[in-house]
Image (tube, rainbow, N blue to C red):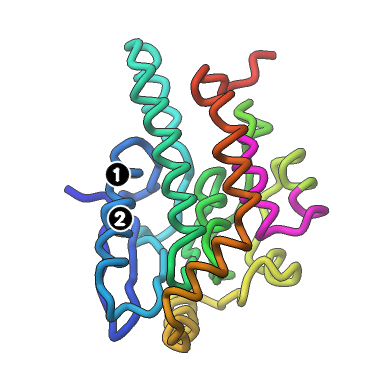
Amino acid sequence: MAVVKWKKQDTVAIVSMCNAANRMNKIFAQDLTLCLDQVEADTQVKAMILTATDEKNFSQGVDVEWIGERLAAKQRQDVIDFMYGMNDVFKRLLLFPLPVIAAINGHAFGNGAILSCACDFRFMRKDKGFFCFPEVDVRIPLLPGMVALVRKAVPEYMFNHMLLSGRRMTAGDLGTSNVLVKACENQEELMTDAMAFAAGFDKKRGIFRELKKRIHRELIQIMDEQDPEFIDTLNLFATE
């Protein structure tokens, strides 16, 4: 059963993570990549919304339990493949030739929050869900590419505070800091507003692709040149 699926509503593709907490592992990366392939192949699609079907979660981030099981079974390559697979997802979103809108319907923790930062625009509901980076508490430092990804969407002062404190932010917090296009009152308003925003786009894919390529050139260079030092050695955890 797919853990990510998509449908088209008029000219908008709605990509939905549909595995409850939507924790990210190798299968998640593969399914999301497949959906992105299919959306891009549909030339009638003018914009894409990324959201989730769970009542309380957008994504709880990396599937740490899955990683632990693979490492215990000495299946290190699976973990390495997953890390590169997620970087490919992030780069794909950064360079996607359409506007990508995150409709954050619930908790966005760690990699889930980073996934929304890889999108071009963000909406989030105010009545449910927190946005945070709990890495300081679980002792998993962000990769250099992840740091760069968040910095494109979150003001430096806020990111510094969130990363070093693990503080959970609300949609209201993010809205006043311009991380979001809008903090929405509830799920219905979230999807209504995200859909209306997405439907307003009718741009050529070529210019969208080229603009995003130029905007994110340095970010992608960081992912390509600096992340392998930590991924290839599986230097993913702080030991002290």
**Mark identifier at residue 64:** none
In the image, the segment drawn in magenta is 143-159
The residue shown at (55%, 38%) is 224
Local crowd at mark 2 within 10 Å, few (<14), some, or many (≥20)?
many
Drawn side of residue 229 relative to residue 209, left or right: right
> Dividing the image into 4 quarters, which one contains the C terminus?
top right
Drawn side of residue 31 relative to residue 141, left or right: left
Give x and y (percent) for residue 182. 61, 77
Q: Secondary structure at mark 1?
A: helix
Front residue of 201 and 1: 201
**Mark identifier at residue 18:** 2
Front residue of 150 and 180: 150
The residue shown at (72%, 42%) is 163
Drawn side of residue 195 relative to residue 231, left or right: left
Q: Magenta segment, principal secondary structure?
A: helix
Front residue of 80 and 141: 80
Drawn side of residue 100 relative to residue 33, left or right: right
Residue type at mark 1: give it. Answer: Gln
Q: Quadrant of residue 198?
A: bottom left
Q: Secondary structure at mark 2?
A: loop
Give x and y (percent) for residue 152. 67, 57
Does 176 sit above or below residue 33? below
The residue shown at (39%, 33%) is 82
The residues tagged by marks 1 and 2 sit, at their Cα atoms, a distance apart of: 14 Å
Residue type at mark 2: give it. Answer: Cys
Does 129 sit above or below residue 149? below
Is 190 inside the magenta-drawn segment?
no
